[in-house]
Amino acid sequence: MMGQLPRPSRRQWLAGAGGALFLGASLARSPVVRAAEPDLAQLKSLTSGLAPISTAERAARVQRAQALMRENGIGAVLIEPGSSLVYFTGIKWWRSERLTAVILPAEGEAGIVTPFFEAPSIEQMLDIKAEVRVWQEDEDPLKLVAGFLKDRGLARRPVGIEETVRYLAIDGLKRALPDVKLVSANPVVRGCRMRKTPAEIALMQGANDVTMAAYRWVYPRVEKGMSQADLAGLIEAASIRLGGEAPGSLILIGEGTAYPHGSIVPETVGEGRVVLFDCGCSVKGYASDISRTFVYGTPSALQRKVWSEMARGQQVANAAAKIGTPAGKVDDAVRAYYESLGYGPRYTLPGLSHRTGHGIGMDGHEPINLVHGETTPLAEGMCFSNEPGIYLPGQFGMRLEDCFHMTATGPKWFTEPPTSMDAPFG
């Protein structure tokens, strides 16, 4: 099928790994979803009034990138298809052996290099002013990139490489322009993308609203004997009805909750078993990522204790997230609290075996992370997940995940965390 083919996410990878995760496209005909269709039909879109990113905002992004290039001594930035290409140009494309790429120069209009027969489609999607240069099947597209740089007087200036660009493009550019100096484009691309604008935050809020509404719709419909696939199918079907796009669901049950991304062992809902939802969707290109953990039936004393400790850990992280604070200090605060309870130390189990959170925006996972050693200071507009789970191998795990964005006065939740294990969805 034509369209953007993103890199496999953790959820897609796990789907191929065995059975802990299920994607909605394969579940639309499941008996549980079919039975719920009359109820699903009553759900209404929550996103119809949300505006996509405007042409003016995309132009402002290019201007910001050019300012950062000049500040960092970079002459141009090379970007392949993916979220960064969409971010700057509006072009939703896929990666293949046929190179399509944008060259953002420090001054002037961008350049697009694409196969001749793809140019009409590229031009339809292009949302900024740019020169389109085409190559034929028997030509080297990197020679066009080199030619653009020479024509703009940029061949002797450092060229920034967006961090996901493939080796084939880097190697081809070196062959076409042997004296080129290649550098990381992170100061430019991350410098733009890490700090979200109000328009971006509004779309992220929409995606979070969809996921939470889907959770609240599904929760009272959870029944004994339901499989991970049943629950994923319901959540994803509800997300689509509510206006979400590309929903994905990681559903863990029982012992599988002790492993942050699950196991290959299929599980079903049962009395006293922990159930963990880790789901999200996209709204006009911007993602949500929310986790909730509950017990079907009556929780044990140990389950209640661990849930409460984990919920407190999430609040410790929130309190540590202050403007100007190095991002890694948020993770440090959580680990210090958990170690005071006897967990760890560090990543040792029982305890927290992964970072406290990750950046989020157009991609479900973006730079930077809330992880020990990350020195980037928190700044207004940055968006993160806050998910300091606690995992007891062989037994169960507990995780809440809510995302937040940094404001001038501190963090603001996209979704409010629950305060009680007995009301996991508020």
Image (cartoon, grey):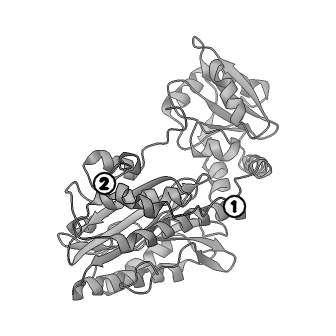
What residue do we see at 36% from left, 55% from top?
34
Check disc 2 and report its element: helix, strand or loop: helix
Image side of residue 111 versus residue 287, left or right: right
Pointer 1: what residue?
Answer: 49
Q: Residue at x 47, y 54 (%)?
A: 247
Residue 397: x %, y % from top left: 28, 72
Q: Residue at the location (65% across, 69% down)?
A: 379
**How far across and down, in percent of the image, does residue 1 sit?**
49, 32
Residue 418 drawn above or below residue 144: below
Q: Quadrant of residue 393?
A: bottom left
Looking at this view, name the residue that lies furthest to the right: 108
Q: Which disc is residue 348 wearing? A: none
> For numbered disc 1, what is the local secondary structure?
loop
Give the distance between the C-alpha atoms of the residues marked 1 and 2, in whole angstroms. 33 Å
Local crowd size for mark 2, using a 10 Å CA cut-off: few (<14), some (14–19), many (≥20):
few
Of circles 1 and 2, the one toward us is 2
Dot 1: few (<14), some (14–19), or many (≥20) neighbours within 10 Å?
few
Residue sitting farthest toward the top: 138
Residue at x 60%, y 49% (from the top left corner): 186
Amino acid on which disc 2 is placed: Pro
Q: How many marks?
A: 2
Query: As shown in the figure, which amino acid type bears the numbered disc 1?
Result: Gly
Q: Give the mark, 1 or 2, whose residue is nearer the N terminus.
A: 2
* Position of residue 222 in the picture relative to residue 216 (left or right): left
Q: Which residue is mark 2?
A: 31
Residue contact between numbered discs 1 and 2, judged by CB atoms under 8 Å: no
